[in-house]
Image: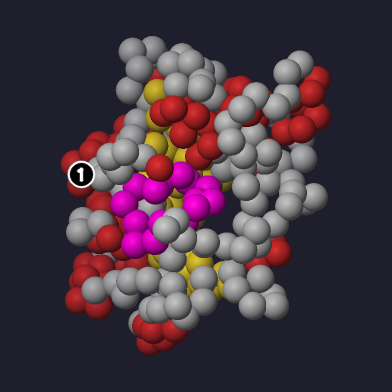
Amino acid sequence: MNKLDLPRLSIVVTERCTLKCKLCAEYSPYYKPQPHYTLKEVETFLDEIFSIVDEVGDLSFSGGEPLLHQDLWSMIAYASKYSNRINRLLILTNGTILPNRIYLLELQKYYSKIWNKLRFHISDYGPALSANADYLCQLCEELCIDYRRICYHGQDMFHGGWVDYGDHSKKYHTMDEIKAHAIKCAFRKDIFFVASSCRYLSRCNRATYRKYLGILPENTSDIVDIYSNVSLTEKRNQIQRLKEAKFSESCAYCNGLCDDSIRFPPAEQIK
Ligand code: SF4
């Protein structure tokens, strides 16, 4: 059997967040109600995904705001079971919450294999919103945790700001139009997977949300259900096809993240 690796896999552990960003790329504020997954659901997902794929490059815990999840540290401790098959473990945070130092020290003491792969990605929306970004960076330095601070304010704003993925109306109609558009999107140039509902794998959060809205059909080829009744070989083939796909059904409804996309101020809050 050929090796099946996922270069990047992001597990959405909660759609709850400390912010309500109008242009949230994950659409977290727009889920009603906002899903919040249990420790058991995430553990079961990890067991299932590692029974299907061989390795994951960057495994991210994301949201919403993952530091809001009371069981995040237990989830990471559980992921240590697969530490030899994970290159790096990321926590994607918005800099609003300081992680509990005691939990971090426990992770350092008892789960050193995963601890050594830990990295915080801190999206910094400025002191008014990301009030704990400075403290979090200090904490990472103090505990020798790898981190990356992504500045979304001021003159050196990352990527010049955020984009608006659009209103979900159909924008591209023929296969050629969809392909020509999708090829310009950063989410197609890179191989990125997202796991939603602790069971669905897709290449993009927009596809997941469009399925939730009913814009994409239940059996869309954009999404692989890792608990479906097909054989292991077929699941691996489905994931491999997703990995190789140059575009998805969702791209027909999407502005995408393109070099020439109009940029907007990041993290504008819904009133
Ligand atoms: S254009 Fe396609 S790949 Fe890019 S963000 Fe939209 S749905 Fe995702």
Residue 111, given in percent of the width and then of the height, sits at: 27, 64
- Count of marks overlaid on the render: 1
Residue at 72%, 33% in the rendered image: 182
**Is residue 19 within the magenta segment?**
yes
Q: What predominant SS class does the magenta segment belong to?
A: loop
Which image quadrant is residue 213 in? top left
Residue drawn 64% across the image and 51% down it: 163
Residue in the image at 20% along x and 44% along y: 38
User: Which of the two residues, 2 or 114, is positioned nearer the viewer here?
Assistant: 114
Q: Mark 1 points at which residue?
A: 38
Identify which residue, 45 or 69, lies in the foreground.
69
Relative to the observer, which residue lies in front, 106 or 128?
128
- Which stretch did the figure color magenta? 15-29
Indicate yes or no whether the magenta region holds residue 24.
yes
The answer, for residue 165, to whether it is visible in the render is yes
Say which residue appears at 20% left-offset and 59% top-offset. 70
Q: Is residue 88 left or right of residue 40?
A: right
x and y percent of residue 116 in the render?
A: 40, 68
Counting from the top left corner in percent of width and height, residue 178 is at 74, 25
For label 1, count other residues whose C-alpha is less than 10 Å away and answer few (under 14), some (14-19) or many (20+). some
The amino acid on which the numbered mark 1 sits, given as a three-letter code, is Thr
Q: Dot 1 lies on which element?
A: loop
